Amino acid sequence: MPDLLTHAASGYLIGRGFYSDHRVALIVFGSILPDLMTRVPGIILQRFLELPVAHFFGAFHTPVALAVACYLISFLFAQLHRQTSFLLMLAGALLHFVLDLMQEQFYQPIYMPWFPFSFQAMQWSWFHIHASLLVTPILLIVILWLWRKDNKLLSAGY
């Protein structure tokens, strides 16, 4: 859960730097999409139903699969907004992927940036996998403060 909040907060902070409207939500959605596509089905199917699906859903946590998912989700939007929604969700998803590459895993790298061309996993090991536990409370306070500040500006007519 802290990792998902960290990804959402990162998407919000990046998106807020560029936009002040609904487009931020598309970046935030993209920033949590990789975990929604892999962790949620993995937890339900593997932990609860004991089906060996970890490798199958691990392939969804790759740039190519994320691009395909964002493309398919963009068809839920009106044709006029499809390209923008696709690009913003993809930007959020790639932000998520880059943040995951930065973290050190327990035993070995698990992220495959070149899939399906290579199954070679990699990581940069810039911070520990549990660093989000320390960062999440700070990010949550910053995000709530910014969100409140933005809502005050909107209600004042800016």
Image (spheres, helix red, strand yellow):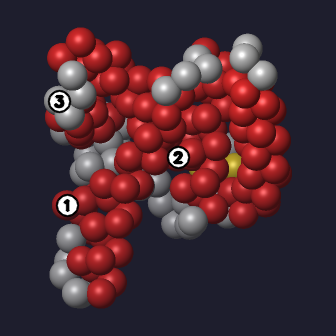
Residue 59 appears at what percent x and percent y? 25, 51
Of mark 3 and mark 1, the one earlier in the sequence is 1
Residue 75, numbered label: 3
What residue is drawn where x is 78% and y is 22%? Answer: 156
The amino acid on which the numbered mark 3 sits, given as a three-letter code, is: Phe
Q: Which residue is mark 2?
A: 100
Q: Which residue is mark 1?
A: 56
Q: Quick check: 92 left or right of 15? A: left
What residue is drawn where x is 35% and y is 75%? Answer: 43
Of mark 2 and mark 3, the one earlier in the sequence is 3
**Residue 72 appears in the picture as rendered:** yes
Residue 21 picture quarter: top right
What distance separates the C-alpha of mark 3 from that of mark 1? Answer: 24 Å
Find numbered disc 1 in the image and state the secondary structure of the residue it sits on: helix
Of mark 1 and mark 2, the one earlier in the sequence is 1
Considering every residue shown, the one lying at the far front of the view is: 156
Question: In the picture shown, does residue 123 fall above or below 35?
Answer: above
Residue 64 appears at what percent x and percent y? 25, 33
Residue 87, numbered label: none
Question: In the picture shown, does residue 147 fall above or below 60?
Answer: above
What residue is drawn where x is 29% and y is 38%? Answer: 66
The quadrant of the rendering that contains the N terminus is bottom right
The amino acid on which the numbered mark 2 sits, given as a three-letter code, is: Asp
